[in-house]
Amino acid sequence: MNDPFGTAIKEYFDRGKAPQIQINTNYTEDETITPSYFFRSEKELPLLEKAALKNCKGKILDIGAAAGCHSLILQKKGYNVTALEKSELAVEVMKKQGIVKVINADIFEYSEKQFNTILLLMNGAGIGGTVAGLKKLLTHLKSLLLEGGQILLDSSDIKYLFEEEDGSQWVDLANANYYGEMQYEVRFRKSTDKFDWLYIDSDSLQNLANEIGYSYTLLQQGNHYDYLARLTL
């Protein structure tokens, strides 16, 4: 099964421990994620994710919910939240944790209900994979928003990865594909997966959102080139 994240989430939930998830990209190698990261409490969330949850309203769709840590926090606060996740194993874990509304689907193929708030957290913009893919995603999400609805999403500007100590850049960012378009290879035990993943800077996201018909608000900036944005129709 090519589902390293879901496999890691299920093992950690079942056993209370699991080895690191291994990640290599076209820019980086030998990075890891500990599976416990997907089971964080509200106190353990970074400031941007806390801010996103505080800005939620109405019916909420949590896209790419993973183990459901955000959905679980919101549900305990009394919100009407639906967790959407394409990993069957992660969906199984969310249901066992008591999340009431869980959908096992790819967001690009989901169109059944509409919501006041759509969450794309843990670099949720990355789900688009590429700038063109993010445009397709945000266009699709317009159909899932109720009148006055909002999308809350976070991302990072990874331009810093290409800067030398003297301020020059080792990649010609102007004459390549958008520098935030990355190729990921993820491994957990014998389960592996390869996919495109996107990090997009705030100005580029604003331009893309405006092109599609959204209003853009930069809600908060993090400590390391990351930010939280709100898109409204």
Image (spheres, grey):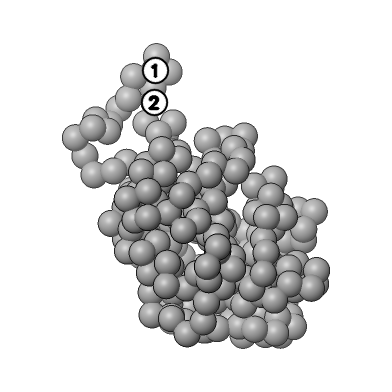
Secondary structure of residue under mark 2: loop
Residue 47 image point, x, y percent: 69, 45
167 on left or right of 91: left
Q: CA distance from mark 1 to mark 2?
A: 6 Å
Q: Residue at x 73, y 68 (%)?
A: 74
Q: Which residue is mark 1?
A: 167
User: Up-down: is 79 above or below 195?
Assistant: below
Q: How many marks can you see?
A: 2
Give residue 193's quadrant in the image: bottom left
Q: Nearer the viewer, residue 210 or 94?
A: 210
Task: Using the rendered image of the protein, determine whether residue 153 is visible from the camera's viewpoint.
Answer: no
Q: Nearer the viewer, residue 12 or 115?
A: 115
Residue 15 image point, x, y percent: 72, 77
Instruction: Report crowding for label 1: few under 14, some 14 to 19, many 20 or more residues within 10 A (C-alpha).
Output: few
Q: Nearer the viewer, residue 24 or 98?
A: 98
Q: Which residue is mark 2?
A: 163
150 on left or right of 162: right
Quarter of the figure that contains the N terminus: bottom left
196 on left or right of 151: left
Secondary structure of residue under mark 1: loop
Give residue 197's quadrant in the image: bottom left
Amino acid type, label 1: Gly
Q: Residue at x 36, y 64 (%)?
A: 139
User: Up-down: is 209 above or below 11?
Assistant: above
Callout 1–callout 2 Cβ contact below 8 Å: yes
Residue 35 image point, x, y percent: 63, 64
Amino acid type, label 2: Glu
Q: Residue furthest top?
A: 166
Q: Nearer the viewer, residue 19 or 183?
A: 183
User: Up-down: is 20 above or below 226?
Assistant: below
